[in-house]
Image (spheres, helix red, strand yellow):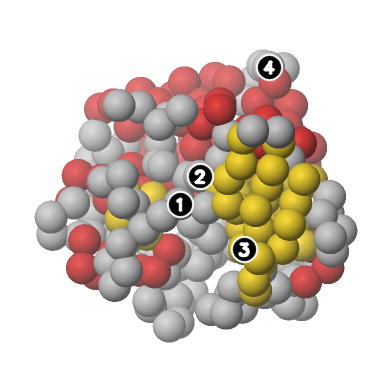
C-alpha cells in the first residue's frame, strides 16, 4: 500500500508541539516531539535552525531548509522514501519537522544493501542529484512498515560538487529507465511555476537552484551513475 503522506502533513504543520527528548546521536540539536491536532497525533523530529553546528561550507541556518528541500525533490521525483518534512516554528524557533518513522534497530545500508539492492538504485540517483555530502549508512533505515527510508538531508544542494556517500555500488552503470524518466520529468517541472517548484526556489539560493538544474542535466545527458570525485573525500566519516 502506498504511503499516505497527505494525512500527516496537516498534523506536522498545525499540531501543538510537545518536546519529548533530545536525539542523542545527532550532531546538531534535534528533538523528538509529539504533535497533537485534535484527535490526531504523531511523533516527529524537530531540528531548530538555531541548533545547527557552524560549518565552513554551508551557511548558518540553511540546513533545516535543505532537509525540507530534499523532501520536496523526493515528492517531485517519486523517490526515494523521505518522511514528510516541513518548515515551521517550534519551542526553539524555526526548524525542520520530519515525521518520525519507526525503524528496525541495527539495520542500515551495510546490513540492507544485499537484500534491498533495488531500493538502493533510486537512493544513489537522488544523492547524485541532490549533491548529498553526508549519506552515511545509518541514514538509510528499514522501517517497521517494510519500506526503506532515507533521513538526514541537511548537507545537500550545495552549489559546489561535494557528493559524499557510502552508496557507490552502481558507478558508471546505466540509470534504470524509470528513474531516468522521472529525472526528465523533474527537469521539466523546474521550468514551470507549480507549487513544488515555487517551494523549492524559496528553500534554495539562486546559485544552488542553478547547480541543481546542471546536475539534473548531466545525469540525463550521461544516463549513468557518477563515479567518485577525484578531488574530494567521497565517503563520509563515520560511514555509519
**Residue 201: percent from the left, percent from the top?**
74, 35
Q: Quadrant of residue 212?
A: top right
Q: Circle 2 sits on which residue?
A: 83
Q: Is residue 102 visible?
A: yes
Which circle marks residue 101 in the picture? Answer: 1
Q: Earlier in the sequence, mark 2 or mark 1?
A: 2
Give the spatial CA distance, label 2 vs label 3: 14 Å
Pointer 2 and pointer 3: residues touching (CB < 8 Å)? no
Give the crowd class for mark 4: few <14, some 14-19, many >=20 residues within 10 Å.
few
Q: Earlier in the sequence, mark 3 or mark 4?
A: 3
Pointer 2 and pointer 1: residues touching (CB < 8 Å)? yes
Element assignment for label 4: loop
Element assignment for label 2: loop
**Residue 176: percent from the left, percent from the top?**
24, 34
Q: Earlier in the sequence, mark 2 or mark 4?
A: 2
Q: Circle 3 sits on which residue?
A: 32
Q: Earlier in the sequence, mark 4 or mark 1?
A: 1
Q: Number of callouts in the render?
A: 4
Give the spatial CA distance, label 2 vs label 1: 7 Å
In the image shown, does 203 or 151 lie closer to the viewer? 151
Q: Earlier in the sequence, mark 2 or mark 3?
A: 3
Q: Nearer the viewer, mark 3 or mark 4?
A: 3
Q: Circle 4 sits on which residue?
A: 194
Element assignment for label 3: strand
Name the residue: 68% across, 17% down: 194
Amino acid at each position: 500500500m502506498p504511503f499516505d503522506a497527505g494525512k500527516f502533513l496537516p498534523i506536522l504543520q498545525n499540531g501543538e508541539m510537545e518536546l519529548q527528548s533530545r536525539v542523542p546521536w545527532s550532531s546538531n540539536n534535534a528533538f523528538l516531539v509529539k504533535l497533537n491536532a485534535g484527535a490526531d497525533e504523531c511523533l516527529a523530529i524537530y531540528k531548530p535552525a538555531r541548533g545547527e553546528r557552524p560549518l565552513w561550507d554551508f551557511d548558518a541556518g540553511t540546513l533545516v531548509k535543505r532537509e525540507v528541500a530534499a523532501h520536496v525533490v523526493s515528492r517531485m521525483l517519486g523517490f526515494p522514501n523521505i518522511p514528510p518534512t516541513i518548515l515551521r516554528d517550534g519551542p526553539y524557533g524555526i526548524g525542520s519537522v520530519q515525521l518520525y518513522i519507526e525503524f528496525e534497530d541495527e539495520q542500515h545500508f551495510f546490513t540492507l544493501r544485499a537484500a534491498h539492492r533495488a531500493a538502493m538504485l533510486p537512493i544513489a540517483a537522488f544523492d547524485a542529484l541532490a549533491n548529498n555530502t553526508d549519506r552515511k549508512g545509518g541514514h538509510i533505515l528499514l522501517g517497521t512498515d517494510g519500506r526503506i527510508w532515507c533521513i538526514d538531508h541537511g548537507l545537500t544542494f550545495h552549489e559546489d560538487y561535494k557528493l559524499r556517500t557510502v552508496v557507490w555500488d552502481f558507478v558508471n552503470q546505466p540509470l534504470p529507465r524509470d528513474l531516468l524518466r522521472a529525472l526528465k520529468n523533474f527537469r521539466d517541472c523546474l521550468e514551470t511555476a507549480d507549487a513544488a517548484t515555487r517551494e523549492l526556489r524559496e528553500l534554495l539560493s539562486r546559485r544552488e537552484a542553478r547547480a541543481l538544474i546542471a546536475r539534473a542535466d548531466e545525469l540525463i545527458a550521461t544516463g549513468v551513475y557518477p563515479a567518485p570525485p577525484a578531488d574530494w573525500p567521497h565517503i563520509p566519516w563515520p560511514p555509519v
